[in-house]
Amino acid sequence: MSTFPIQAASNSSISMDPNFLLVGLPGLSAVPSLWTIPLITVYLLSALGNGTILWIIALEPTLHHPMYFFLFLLSLSDVGLATSLMPTLLGLALADAHAVPASACLLQMFFVHVFSVMESSVLLAMAFDRALAICRPLHYPRLLTNDVITKIGLAIVFRCLGLHLPLPFLLARMPYCRPQVLTHSYCLHPDMARLACPGARGAVYSFFVVLSAMGLDPLLIFFSYGLIGRVLQGLGSSEDRWKAGQTCATHLSAVLLFYVPMILLALIDHLRVPIPQAAHTLLSYVHFLLPPLMNPILYSVKMKEIRERIFKRLQPRKVGSSH
């Protein structure tokens, strides 16, 4: 078990305790095993769906285009996010394990936020891609070259890792004035940082890192869709508008699926809306677990190219097995 030194400080503050305590799964703390099958099912379906998207895009040269590269990164972030959440969720479901070593909690917090910001960054890049494709269709191939796509991918990786790498170290060194009891079933930065003493060094940077992406990205995404909407209004026929709008429908669904629960959680916390803790916790599950589950379904159903390539890859096996 990881240990952190406990030292006396002003205002009865101490450094980080060896363990954090997680809230149990709402309503089922007496029978935690009932959560096991749904959690494992959600995770396996998420891994299967996103793994299929990753497999198809990696193996099909016809899909090596900007839109599918961003979809590849989106599936990668979804798998990483779901995997990062599972250790504490399954620990609560299988063994009602509320105590988590501080080092494990910091590690989970790091990966949860890295993959969350990665997903947000990819959704922003996809919005940028759609805006260029619709607003500047003639210049699209020249503007979004493979070199530009590579730079965007590297920028996303550096943004996630570079900004978030200091967070676990900052949290570990902060003085804590409150019991280390979290309000979720997994370790999140705002939940951990609120336990620190007021004015703790590093708190400003920590909140800036977390809020900069989640606050800026949705604004830029909806700005991109504002530009797309203006172009669609100028198209001559309703059929042209429908075809152009369909290319954005799947991405917009993924955006709403990711940001709406997050914005609701932020408003509930900021406005101190008096809702039951169980409802608050379940909404956080929707925010983190529903996009990895639903995104592969959305893109497989809505995008003809993905669906056709999946059937194409599976068809030879069926034909070969019949002979």
Image (spheres, rainbow, N blue to C red):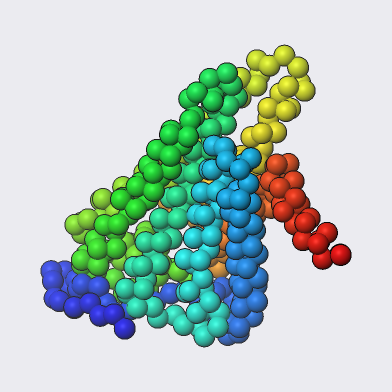
Left or right: residue 1 versus residue 186 is: left
Asked whether the viewer can see residue 279, the reply is no
Dividing the picture into quadrants, the one containing residue 289 is bottom right
- Location of the C terminus by quadrant is bottom right
Q: Nearer the viewer, residue 111 or 19?
A: 111
Name the spot of residue 16 as percent of width and height, x first: 25, 73
Q: Image point 54% across, 25% down: which residue? A: 141
Instruction: Give whichever of 12, 104 is nearer the camera.
Output: 104
**Looking at the image, is 266 positioned above or below residue 20?**
above
Percent position (x, y) of residue 166? 26, 57
What residue is rendered at 26% in x and 50% in y? 205
* Quarter occupied by residue 192: bottom left
Residue at 45% x, 50% y is 118
Residue at 58 percent of width and 85 percent of height: 30
Q: Is residue 301 above or below residue 173?
A: above
Q: Nearer the viewer, residue 308 or 134?
A: 308
Q: Nearer the viewer, residue 309 or 120?
A: 309
Horizontally, residue 280 falls left or right of residue 17, namely right
Q: How many marks?
A: 0
* Left or right of residue 143, residue 41 in this image: right
